Image (spheres, grey):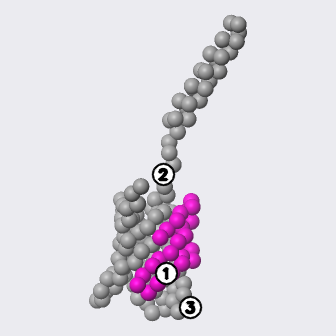
């Protein structure tokens, strides 16, 4: 009888220790780039162009789309390394590049469009997640 009580006590201590050990585990944060970003591209001498980036991040790889008033453009290649974002998109008529740095909760950077040589600055803020 004493051995059974002693074993039960040891088992309870092991279970309690495991619960304490795993309760201190840190929750993994969402990747910093993942989410919806409301952005504005600036074109020298012309009006601003609003656009939305819907991004997913897996390690350093970034995927998703950029949407403007002209439609949705899938990201061909994208990376986020050491705080720097690089996105490349293509259509049959043009190649686009978007680069930027995350500054707190805002991206700031440059964009370009080839072959016509258009370029400028852009910035964007992450949209607030929907309330549950």
| 79 relative to 117 in the view: left or right | right
Rendered location of residue 71, percent (x, y): 46, 84
Element type at mark 1: strand
Q: Which residue is at a point 45% across and 79% down the rendered structure image?
A: 67
Q: What range of the chain is rendered magenta?
A: 54-79
Give yes or no for residue 71 being in the magenta stretch.
Answer: yes
Q: Mark 3: give few (<14), some (14-19) or many (20+) Cα within 10 Å.
A: few
Rendered location of residue 75, percent (x, y): 54, 76
Earlier along the polypeptide chain: callout 1 or callout 3?
A: 1
Q: Nearer the viewer, residue 129 or 83?
A: 129
Instruction: Quickly name the residue at label 1.
Output: 72
Residue 92: which disc?
3
Q: Which residue is at a point 52% across and 35% down the rendered structure image?
A: 23
User: Dominant secondary structure of the magenta stretch?
Assistant: strand
Q: Nearer the viewer, mark 1 or mark 3?
A: 1
Figure quadrant of the C terminus: bottom left
Q: Nearer the viewer, residue 109 or 105?
A: 105
Instruction: Quickly name the residue at label 2.
Output: 29
Element type at mark 2: loop
- Residues at circles 3 and 2 in contact by the CB criterion of under 8 Å: no
State which quadrant residue 6 falls in.
Answer: top right
Earlier along the polypeptide chain: callout 3 or callout 2?
A: 2
Q: Which residue is at a point 61% across and 21% down the rendered structure image?
A: 12
Most extreme residue toward the front is 132
Rendered location of residue 91, percent (x, y): 54, 87
Give yes or no for residue 75 being in the magenta stretch.
Answer: yes
Rendered location of residue 117, percent (x, y): 43, 90
Above/below status of 114 relative to 66: below
Above/below status of 9 relative to 74: above
Figure quadrant of the N terminus: top right
Element type at mark 3: loop
């Amino acid at each position: 009888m004493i051995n059974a009580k002693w074993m039960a006590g040891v088992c309870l201590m092991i279970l309690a220790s495991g619960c304490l050990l795993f309760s201190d585990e840190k929750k993994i944060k969402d990747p910093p780039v993942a989410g919806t970003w409301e952005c504005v591209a600036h074109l020298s001498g012309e009006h601003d162009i609003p656009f939305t980036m819907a991004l997913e991040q897996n390690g350093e790889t970034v995927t998703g789309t950029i949407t403007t008033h002209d439609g949705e453009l899938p990201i061909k290649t994208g990376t986020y390394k050491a705080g720097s974002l690089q996105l490349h998109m293509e259509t049959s008529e043009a190649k686009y590049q978007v680069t930027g740095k995350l500054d707190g909760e805002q991206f700031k950077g440059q964009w370009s469009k080839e072959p016509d040589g258009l370029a400028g600055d852009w910035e964007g803020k992450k949209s607030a997640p929907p309330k549950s």
